Image: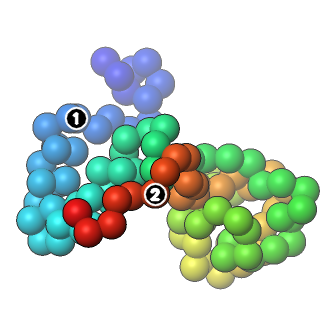
Amino acid sequence: MLRQSGANAVITSSSAAGRLLGLSMLSPSVGQVMDDLITYGSGLDLIERPVTKAEVGKAPRDVADLVVSVKRGHRLLGFDDPDAATLQFADRLIAIHRAGPALPSGE
């Protein structure tokens, strides 16, 4: 039903929880960061945003946010893809952005 209504991807809560649990067992620190990323509005957020005029022509690593992927047209390019080496005005960035207080250390 979700795909019929226009969703490009469907993530079930049980599969996401299972992946997070498995990741946390392998590396508790990585699990904590992933939990922070999927909890929108505090700590670290995974966002999609347009490239600013000041960022056009720069490499993804040279912008303020930590760029994970570049959406160019209908293509999703990894931050290290040679085709994404120079940001274009119509690009959208998938990036990690600080939304609130830092994660507590030592937990």
Question: Which mark's residue is nearer the viewer, 2 or 1?
Answer: 2
Observer-nearest residue: 102 or 40?
102
Cα–Cα span, label 2 and label 1: 28 Å
Please determine whether, in this image, residue 3 is positioned above or below residue 57: above
Specify whether 22 is left or right of 101.
left
Quickly name the residue at label 1: 12
User: Which quarter of the rendering shows the C terminus?
Assistant: bottom left
Q: Earlier in the sequence, mark 2 or mark 1?
A: 1
Q: Which x, y percent locates residue 88? A: 82, 62
Q: Which x, y percent locates residue 96? A: 54, 58
Q: Regarding mark 2 in the picture, which secondary structure is present there?
A: loop
Observer-nearest residue: 33 or 77?
33
Q: Are marks 2 and 1 in contact (CB under 8 Å)?
A: no
Residue 12 in view here? yes
The residue shown at (73%, 75%) is 62
Quickly name the residue at label 2: 102
Q: Amino acid at mark 1?
A: Thr
Q: Which x, y percent locates residue 97? A: 57, 55
Q: Regarding mark 1 in the picture, which secondary structure is present there?
A: loop
Residue 77 in view here? no
The residue shown at (21%, 45%) is 16
Specify whether 12 is left or right of 18.
right
10 Å neighbourhood of mark 1: few (<14), some, or many (≥20)? few
